[in-house]
Image (cartoon, rainbow, N blue to C red):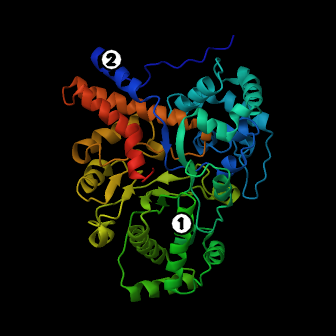
Amino acid sequence: MPRPLTLSPDRLFPREPFALGAARELYAGVKDLPIISPHGHTDPQWFADDEAFPNAADLLLSPDHYLYRMLYSQGISMESLGVPNRAGARTAEPREAWRLLAANYHLFRGTPSDLWLKHVFLEVFGIKVALEAETADHYFDAIGEALQTPAFRPRALLDRFNIEVIATTESPHEDLVHHRKIIADGWGGRVITAYRPDPVVDPEHEAFREALPVFAELSGQDIGGWQGYLEAHRIRRAAFAAVGATSTDHGHPTAQTADLSPVEAERLFGEVMKGPVAPETAELFRAQMLTEMARMSVDDGLVMQIHPGSHRNHNRQVFETFGRDKGADIPTRTDYVRALKPLLDRLGNEPRLSIILFTLDETSYARELAPLAGHYPVLKLGPSWWFHDSPEGMRRFREQTTETAGFYNTVGFNDDTRAFLSIPARHDVARRSDCAFLARLVAEHRLELEDAHQVAGDLAYRLPKKAYKLP
């Protein structure tokens, strides 16, 4: 007999009766607010073409590196899970890949993936039995049948999930054709993009040499010189803004910035373009480009996101076979105080600049990030991210940053995912976690319940809209 699938209405809430009551009341006030998803990695083609998703494995398993990362750690091959290789080829039949997930679902006990998936299975698909080997085919068939109905097309799901705006992420050498189609179909402002220049600013990015000529062609600029290269960025940023972008995103290995003189910057650019370059030269160029991007944000108003601190593609064999973003990225120690000083010396008091800082190094919360954001008007703190977008990670973030930076130097929640159907689940976890934290402050007589209601609504909805300059 299959086990029932259940979700407690009090999940993630405190157990003490007064705090539990406060958490329930706070959550009731925010659970149905529209979702603002200002940073993520869903495929814009989904929303442009609005075609049916193929099957459970292709929708829920193969795009989600949280899932196959765990499975791979237990010796289950990427090929058997249907993860496409660099050439886009797959060797696993989707049903068989799904059966593997089901047979090994116990590996996710206690992880945020379990919370997210149970929400998807029960709330989105209405499945009422637990996922395990015996129910794998039932899941695969039930999900597959649902996906063929109009109610599960991408645009219909945007409405069903109450997603007011969702941002995808593209790079300057991408042509934005899907976003132009979205606008032509009347969905402009609902699905927007973000400017992620990593492939054309990071000399160590594997696509750097191939991306630069496309970048030059799309911008119509000769990027052989430093000024032409910078102008190409300005042109592409404007093209991104024209299809809805309100932000840029920078996934550098560190938060290092630099403020070179024009002569020094031009000399450095010439060295990079000749290539190959030493690691320290690549780091200096990335550092200078963060400052250059900040200068451009002063001019065009795009909000700047800095996502440092990941040793990307740590598993060389996985990277060579499957490419980047396949679950082999590892957090590293990250300095912000010294690394950001060159940029902040130049622009830290500029009222037209807004920078959102993220981290994978939780030791930096109280020591560096909260004090920086609690002082510099250009800085805000992004939410607990990636490895830490979990109930415990969200609690640690609030505990270590609130006393110094407050709530209003943070920006709400980013789901930052490729797994489209998990977006409501991720926002629900964030709202529950924040309500639990606020309820504790109320129970300790550190915050009035009326004020906690205001903060809960701000964190869930109003702060991300304001931080990302969304209408």
Q: Give residue 120's quadrant in the image.
A: top right
Q: Amino acid at mark 2?
A: Gly
Residue named by callout 2: 21
Q: Is residue 357 left or right of residue 198?
A: left
- Give the residue drawn at x 67%, y 55%: 184
Residue 300 visible? The answer is: yes
Quadrant (top left/top right/bottom left/bottom right) for the N terminus: top right
Residue named by callout 1: 198
Q: Where residue 131 sits: x, y (%)?
A: 65, 24
Query: Could you tell me which secondary element the residue under label 2 belongs to?
Result: helix
Residue 421 visible? The answer is: no
User: Is 15 placed above or below 114 here?
Assistant: above
Q: How many marks?
A: 2
User: Is 460 placed above or below 322 here?
Assistant: above
Q: Give residue 340's quadrant in the image.
A: bottom left
Query: Could you tell me which secondary element the residue under label 1 belongs to?
Result: helix
Instruction: Please state which of residues 382 and 67 is positioned toward the viewer in this rendering.
Output: 382
